[in-house]
Image: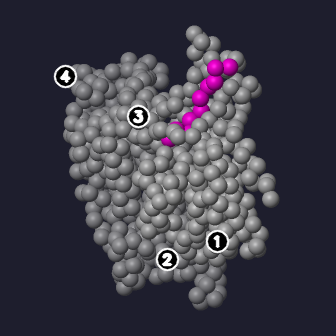
Amino acid sequence: MNGTNHNGIRIGYYICHCGHNIAGVIDCGEVARRIGVLPGVVVSRDYKYMCSEPGQELLRQDIRAHDLNRIVVASCSPLLHEHTFRTAVEDAGLNPYHFQMVNIREHASWVHTDHAAATEKAVDLSRAAVMRVRHHRALTTTRVPINPAVLVVGGGIAGIHAALTLANAGKQVFLVEREPSIGGHMAKFDKTFPTLDCAACILTPKMSSVRAHKGITLWTYSEVAKVEGYVGNYTVTVRRRPRYVNEALCIGCQECISACVYREPKFPDEFNVGLGKRKPVYIPFPQAVPQVVVIDPDRCLELKTGRCKKTCVDACADRNAIDFTQKESLEQIQVGNIIVATGFRLFDAKRIPQYGYGMYPNVVTSLELERLVTSSGPTGGEIRLRDGSAPRSVGFILCVGSRDLKTNRWCSRTCCMHSMKLAQLVREHTGADVTVFYLDIRAPGKGCEEFYDRSLKEGIQFVRGRVAEVTDWALAPEEEGKLVIRVEDTLAGFVRRIPVDMIVLAVGMEPQSDAQSVRRLFNMSCGTEGWFLEKHPKLAPVSTFTDGVFIAGCCQGPKDIPDSIAQAGAAAAEAMALIDRGYIEQEPNTAHVLDDCCGCKSCIPLCPYTAISFDAGSQKAVINEALCKGCGTCAGSCPSGSITQNLFDDDEVFSEIEGLLHA
C-alpha cells in the first residue's frame, strides 16, 4: 500500500465480494492490490460483505487507526447502500461527503462474462473514484421543517385506511376523492374472498368513520389540480366540482329524488356499471359517504336548458339545500406529505371481440355479475339472463386482459379468486352448473388455496386452456339457444365445444386512464406498464422518487384488498415517521448560481423541479435548494457555465474522467 502523502489526502479503499455477485466474476484481491499502489491510498482491502455490521466496523476502525480522510467503497448500487456507508463514515468522525461509492456489481460483474475484462473494468472504475474523491469537499445537509398535515388522494379502501391510520394518530388529513362518494371498487362488491365476508359490513363502518372523524377533511367530487413546493411544505390546489347541493344543509332525505320531474329513472347508473338506471338527481348507492345528493349537470333539465319546474327545489323548501348557482371552486391547502391511492380501472372486454362482450347480451364482466348478485344491485340479488330466466349453466373465462401479449402481460392477481368467489355465489343463488376456463390457477394469499379446494369439492368444473372464441352457432341440438365456448382442453388434449347460458369474463386491472397526468402532477415515475413506480421494490415499496410522496393500493400494481390495506398502512407509517421527526434532511448535492450569471433565464424552463426563479433585483437566476434535487440539468445547460453543482464540481468530474482513461 502506498502511504505517500498526496497533499494531506489519506484514502481508504474497500472492495466488497457481495457473496458471488461480484467475486464470482471479478478478482477482488487483484483489484485491491492494484488500487493500493495509487498515490494517496493508505489502506486497500477486499471483504466479503462490506454492508454488514462487521464490514462497517472494519471501515470505522481503519479511519481511526490510519487517520483516513477519504473513503472509497466498490460494491453494489449507491441507491442501495450509499447511505449505509456515509453513515458509517460519519460515525467515525469524517464528513460523510468525503466518501465515494463505485458500482462494480451492475456496471461490471453483472454485465460481463469475461473475468479478466470485468476485473480490468473494476480497476478502472475504482481508480476513477480514487482520483475523484481527492477533490471532495466537506458538505452539510440542510433541515426542512415538516408540515404535519397529510393529503390522501383517492377514497378507495387504500385511501380510507391510510386516512384513518393518520387521523387516529392525531394528524390532520385531507382526503380527496373525485367520485361523489368514497368507497371505490370495494363498495360494489357483495362478498370478499376467501372468507366470503360481507364487503359492505367491512367497508361501511370505515367510510362512516372517515365522515365522522374530526381529524379528516373529506372532499368528494373533487380533484387535485396543482401541486407546488417540496417535501414537508407542499401547496396543493384542489378543484371542487359543484354538486348543486349544499353539503352543510343536505340531510340525505332523498325527497328531491322522489320529486324530480323524471318520474322514473332514465339514465345509466355508473355505480351499477350501466345495468340499472338513475335520475339526474341521485345518491350513488345506499351506503354512500357523504350521504349527500348530487345533481348531474349533463342530465338535469334546469342546468341544461333552464326550463324545468324545479320540483326538487320545492321538495327541499324546508332545508333549501339545492343550489343551481353553485360554481366550480378552488381550495388551497398546505401539507407536508402526500399519499396517492388512485386505484385502477377494469380492462374493457370489448377489446377482445372474439369473446362476444357487447355482442351477446348474456356475456357479462365479473364486476357486472358482482352487481347482479348483490342485494342492493339492480336486480335485488337475483341472477337473471336477459330474457328474465335463471341460468342453468355458467362459464367463467379467466385472464381476460391479463397474461396476454396482445393486451396486458401482467397477472392481475385477484381474478382467479374473484371468479371462484362468484362461481360459488352463482351456485348458491341459482344452482347452475359452473365451469371455469383458466390458464393457471393462482391462489397465493392466506386461505386462498383452501378456497380453491372448496370450489373443487362443491362441484365447480375447471377446464385448463385459453378460450379461442364465444359463438352462438349451434352445431348440435344441445347447443341450440346457447352460447358456445370453443377451447382447447390442454389437459385432455383436444378442442372442446361447451354450451352455456351465461358467460362471465374475469377482466383484469389496468392503470387509470389519467395515470400519466397524475404522475406528472405529483412528479412521480411510471413503469413501462403504466403503474406508478416505487422507489425500490423491496427496501422502499411505498415511497416514490419524490420525497414526501407515497403510493398505496392498486395504483402501484394489481393487488387484493388485504395487500392494499397493508400497503396503505405502510404509506401512512412512512408519512408519520417524517411528521414525528419534525424535519427532513436535504442532500447537499444541489446546484448553485455563481456571481457571473448573465440572467439569460435559459435554465428556468429546463428545471424539472421548478427550483429556479429569476431575481429582478440582481438580474440573476436563483435556485431554491429545498426544491433542487441535484439532477444537474441546469448546470449542464448554462451557456456561460455560471451554475455549478455540489459533488459534481469540474475538478471532481475531470479527475474522475482522467482516472477512468488512465492505464
Q: How far apart, in angstroms, are the residues tagged by discs 3 and 2?
A: 49 Å
Q: How far apart, in angstroms, are the residues tagged by discs 1 and 3?
A: 41 Å
The mark found on residue 144 in the picture is 3
**Camera-nearest label, 1 or 3:** 1
Range of residues picked out in magenta: 587-596
**Camera-nearest label, 4 or 1:** 1
> Which amino acid does the dot numbered 3 rest on?
Val
Q: Measured from the top left, where is residue 323 in percent x and y?
A: 33, 21
Q: How far apart, in angstroms, are the residues tagged by discs 4 and 1?
A: 83 Å
State the residue position of label 4: 318
Vertical side of 623 occupied by 619: above or below: above
> Which amino acid does the dot numbered 1 rest on?
Cys
State the residue position of label 2: 441
Q: Quadrant of the N terminus?
A: bottom right
**SS category of the residue bearing label 1:** helix
Q: Residues within 10 Å of mark 2 (few under 14, many from 20)?
A: some
Q: Give the left or right position of residue 420, taking residue 589 as reference.
A: left
**Camera-nearest label, 2 or 4:** 2
**Camera-nearest label, 2 or 1:** 1
